Image (tube, rainbow, N blue to C red):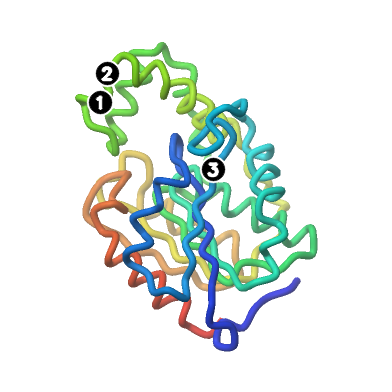
Amino acid sequence: MMTYDTAVHEKMNLFCFPFSGGSFYSYKPFEKHVPRHIHVSGIDLPGHGRRMREPLLTDIHEMVEDIWMSIKDDLNAPYAIYGHSLGSTLAYLFTLKAIAENKPSPCRLFLSGRNAPSVNKRKNIHLLPKQEFIQKLLQYGGTSKELLQEKDLMEFMVPIMRADFQAVETYTYDRNAPRLAIPLTVMIGLNDVDVTYEEALKWQEVTTWKISVRQFPGGHFFIFDHLPEISRIICQDLAEKN
């Protein structure tokens, strides 16, 4: 497996994998809080952001393959991955893909708003009737009640959110997958409706390195209330010699 010494390579690509309904634009605010040597690169899945006209994907492995085809040629430079919620699972599976393809691994994974892959929370939120589905979205936060009541906006967003929820809800963890040999920084909100501290700790099962778990005030989308601190953590952890 190929790795990088971040003490030698100063410049760093930080690929940001999307949460459900998220896009390239979701991570633009991070650019204001990281130094110039860290290049924030948001990812769009088909049917999201700049790729709005493409058919949506509902299988998480197809999503990983799509991301792989988009950035595999950029992996010869030092890089890390940040993923929130769905993006955390995508980041983990993408790293397994990079290892299988004998490409360099990310020097670190930053994972937020998501329990470890081994935690089996089989849900079928993506199958709920429209109004019940929208009510579930309200519980996660990140979108105001007023916006969720906008009929035209919901006609547009609900299919996107359903596809993303389906991808993560139908994913099955492979307990025979190789353990990673890279450090993980895991972050969760104290009031997240979907992730407990104990479930976050189980990310230790996927790596041989001791993980770091940090908690922040807030719910599922706590990240946007703590951008300066999260960015500081990212910079600090990337500066450590792996």
**What quarter of the picture does the C terminus occupy?**
bottom right
Marked residue nearer the N-terminal end (3 or 1): 3
| Above or below, comparing residue 210 to residue 67 in the picture | below
Q: Secondary structure at mark 2?
A: loop
Question: Which residue is label 2 attached to?
Answer: 150
Q: CA distance from mark 3 to mark 2?
A: 24 Å
Given residues 93 and 116, the one toward you in this image is 93
- Image marks 1 and 2: residues in contact by CB distance under 8 Å: yes
Q: Would residue 201 be visible to someone looking at this image?
A: yes
Q: Amino acid at mark 3?
A: Asp
Q: Quadrant of residue 66?
A: top right
As drawn, the label of residue 109 is none
Given residues 140 and 4, the one toward you in this image is 4
Q: Amino acid at mark 2?
A: Glu
Q: Amino acid at mark 1?
A: Leu
- Image marks 3 and 1: residues in contact by CB distance under 8 Å: no
Q: Would residue 124 be visible to someone looking at this image?
A: no
Q: Residue 221 location in percent, x, y? A: 31, 45
Question: Which residue is label 3 attached to?
Answer: 44
- Image marks 3 and 2: residues in contact by CB distance under 8 Å: no
Given residues 100 and 207, the one toward you in this image is 100
**What quarter of the picture does the N terminus occupy?**
bottom right
Question: Which residue is label 1 attached to?
Answer: 147
Q: CA distance from mark 3 to mark 1?
A: 22 Å
